[in-house]
Image (cartoon, grey):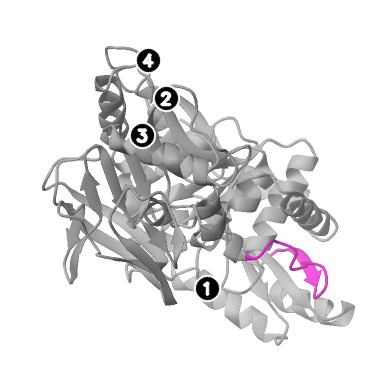
Amino acid sequence: MTAVPRLVLSAPSSGHGTNALSIGLLAALADRGVDVAGFKLGPDHVDAAYLGLAAGRPGRNLDPRLVGAERLLPLFAHGAAGAGLALVQGTMGLYDSVAGRPETESTAAVATVLRSPVVLVVDVAAMGQSVAALVHGFRSYDEQLWLGGVVLTQVASPRHETMLRQALDDIDVPVYGALRRHELPPVLPSRRHGVVPVVRRDAEAVRAVRRLGEAVAGTVDLERLLALARSAPALTVEPWSPAAAEPDGGAPVVALAAGPGGSYSYAETAELLRAAGAEVVAVDPLRDEALPAGARALVVGAGLPESYARELSANRRLCIAVAELARTGRPVLAEGAGLLWLARELDGLPMCGVLDAVGATRDGLVVGYREATALSDSVVTGTGTAVVGYKQHGAVLTPRAGQRAAWSWDGGSPEGFVWRGVHASQLGLHWAARPGIATRLVAAGVAEGVGAPA
């Protein structure tokens, strides 16, 4: 039995302020000495990073599509261990699913699996008594859903707030807070920066989280929300564990693209690498000019944003070091923009030159899940292995794949590059679904000879 006070924050649709409210709520409670944990439903690295910054512990992603529905509860219990409140930020609308599978992948479905109360965040800027009809509809749509109450955003005036509260009182729905139009300020750094402000612990990001915490503390009834979270029943689940057998031959140094505030990978990646016997050392692709001493492998997660191409290109010393690591056959695993970094150039800017390919940024984004099959044996997996990954990128490579491609999927040409110890693709994986990736990579690092110069 795992007792975890918990809440799921969701909304009727995107744009109601759920992200800012989730960050502010974690920051406000952490400031009061509550040990909090933040989770983001879905694959989004950015929201999870800011939740982690607010909570003071790694923000984690709960994605039933990437990790499998059977791992949701164990991963949640693992990430929430010891927390006085675990907060899950939903995605899209409460009953929506980007992949069209709301019965298993929507915020409502995950909240039901977690046996967690849901707090609905509602933008009421253009709404009066109709808020009661809206909330009643969301509450009654699924009889298994536990709608614990609402927080109202974009409230126009005290009179407006009174009207809204009375309407919701008529249907017996608690209101845990009402924020005026200026009280949830748009202070977070632009999303074009991705997770970089958090990874670097930039002052702008830290200040933004603090301001959101102050805004929530002054407008939301934190004690009542905590009481609601504590009313969630204990979970009958064994927490997920990254434990694995340590390989023979020592502990290779694995460089993980990261900074003082976190990494560009999902939080479980570093945990799995350590459990597999690696010594995980951070390397900042934007600032560090050398790989960690004795590095036997490099992992670049899909959270590295494409918008920092100029900074990646300008770090020539690290580009040369990465190219040498790859040339000598050491494991190099790159996802998302990490693939572009390994290319010859991107938008005319020289990159690492590991792969004979050229990247170019195009209008629009390629976004979505892919059910992929491995086309080559690599440090990631064996030929024929089926995985589920996620893509979000604007730049494309020419050619799209090397002589040994990484993946294929229905409706798409082969993608990615497998060369010596390199596995590079714009498809991002959640390693908790494939813990063997860590053991394969560490074993490959050991096989290359621990202690030999890179």
Numbered disc 4: secondary structure: loop
Q: CA distance from mark 1 to mark 4?
A: 59 Å
Amino acid type of the residue that numbered disc 1 sits on in the rendered structure: Phe
Between label 2 and label 4, give the one nearer the viewer. 4
Q: Earlier in the sequence, mark 1 or mark 4?
A: 1
Q: Which mark is residue 325?
A: 3
Left or right: where 69 falls relative to 212: left
**Residue 417: image x %, image y %?**
24, 52
Single out the mark in the foreground, 2 or 1. Answer: 2
Q: How many marks?
A: 4
Label 3, secondary structure: give it: helix
- Residue 219: image location, x then y, percent: 82, 61
Q: Residue 274 — which label? A: 2
Circle 4 crowding by C-alpha within 10 Å: few under 14, some 14–19, many from 20? some
404 with respect to 62 (left or right): left
Q: Which mark sits nearer the N-terminus, 3 or 1?
A: 1
User: Looking at the picture, how far across and down is residue 41, in whole percent?
Assistant: 48, 56
Among numbered discs 2 and 1, the one appearing first in the sequence:
1
The residue wearing badge 1 is 138
Q: What stretch of residues is rendered in magenta? A: 174-190
Residue type indicated by callout 3: Leu
- Secondary-structure class at tag 1: helix
- Would you say the residues marked 2 and 4 are in contact, meaning their CB atoms lie under 8 Å apart? no
Q: Which residue is mark 4?
A: 451
Task: State whether residue 231 appears in this view.
Answer: no
**Amino acid at circle 4:** Gly
Choose the circle earlier in sequence order: 3 or 4: 3
Report the mark closest to the observer, 2 or 3. 3
